[in-house]
Amino acid sequence: EADIYQTPRYLVIGTGKKITLECSQTMGHDKMYWYQQDPGMELHLIHYSYGVNSTEKGDLSSESTVSRIRTEHFPLTLESARPSHTSQYLCASSPGGIITGELFFGEGSRLTVL
Amino acid sequence: GQNIDQPTEMTATEGAIVQINCTYQTSGFNGLFWYQQHAGEAPTFLSYNVLDGLEEKGRFSSFLSRSKGYSYLLLKELQMKDSASYLCAVLADSWGKLQFGAGTQVVVTP
């Protein structure tokens, strides 16, 4: 069973607030990812990391930022939330290596910005 | 650009078989994944194909043809709990970035 955790699971906040979505994994995986998913739509990669101090932007442009100071922790931050940021955010991790295997997903953080 | 297509929805009865097709056009190919996602939950890994042919795992099988840019997921002996969205995803590079299709919602009826 995968050990990857996201908090909060649900968050409703007002426009202009700063928020941080937490993601932690205890599997020692080097690679971590943030995906954004709207209802009935595909997952879009917004950030990824290949290890400590490595972060890259994904295919979908996002105003959020990420950091990777520790292997197990990959938080996502929105400095000033807007209604357009309302979505589900899924964190995932996978073992390192040249060809990556399956992704282990967290339960997701469903964000609503009023 | 990247393009991964799969049907939006399929309906089948309990005990039946359903085949979910996925076609892809990506800049690279290092494998194709199928994930299952129940409503409100995280996706879970079902299968991985990197070579042409059929991979069988219990009631689920996945097929790949790289020359045709085509895969399918076969669900046999359908159960009510199989009602979920099934996501086709392509590993287009060697660094683990998956490109996902929009998913196929499978509805299993009694």
Image: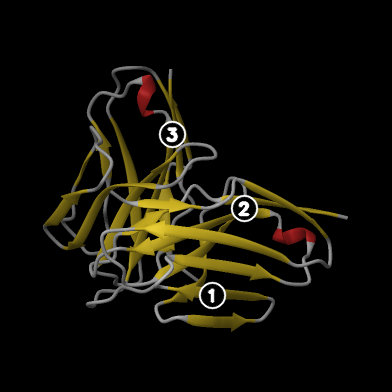
Residue that appears at 11% across and 58% down: A53
Seen from the viewer's position, the closer of residues A83 and B11 is: B11
Q: Distance between the residues labelled 1 and 3?
A: 32 Å
Query: Residue A80 in the image: x percent, y percent?
Result: 25, 23
Q: Residue A87 carries which label?
A: 3
Q: Distance between the residues labelled 1 and 2?
A: 22 Å
Q: Residue furthest front?
A: B68
Query: Residue A7 in the image: x percent, y percent?
Result: 41, 46
Seen from the viewer's position, the closer of residues A97 and A10 is: A97
Seen from the viewer's position, the closer of residues B106 and A97 is: B106
Can residue A105 be seen from the camera position used here? no
- Residue annotated with mark 2: B38
Q: How far apart are marks 2 and 3 (CA)?
A: 17 Å
Quarter occupied by residue B15: bottom right
Query: Dot 1 surroundings within 10 Å: few (below 14), some, or many (20 or more)?
Result: many
Query: Dot 2 surroundings within 10 Å: few (below 14), some, or many (20 or more)?
Result: some
The answer to the question of whether label 1 and label 3 lie on touching residues, with beta carbons closer than 8 A, is no
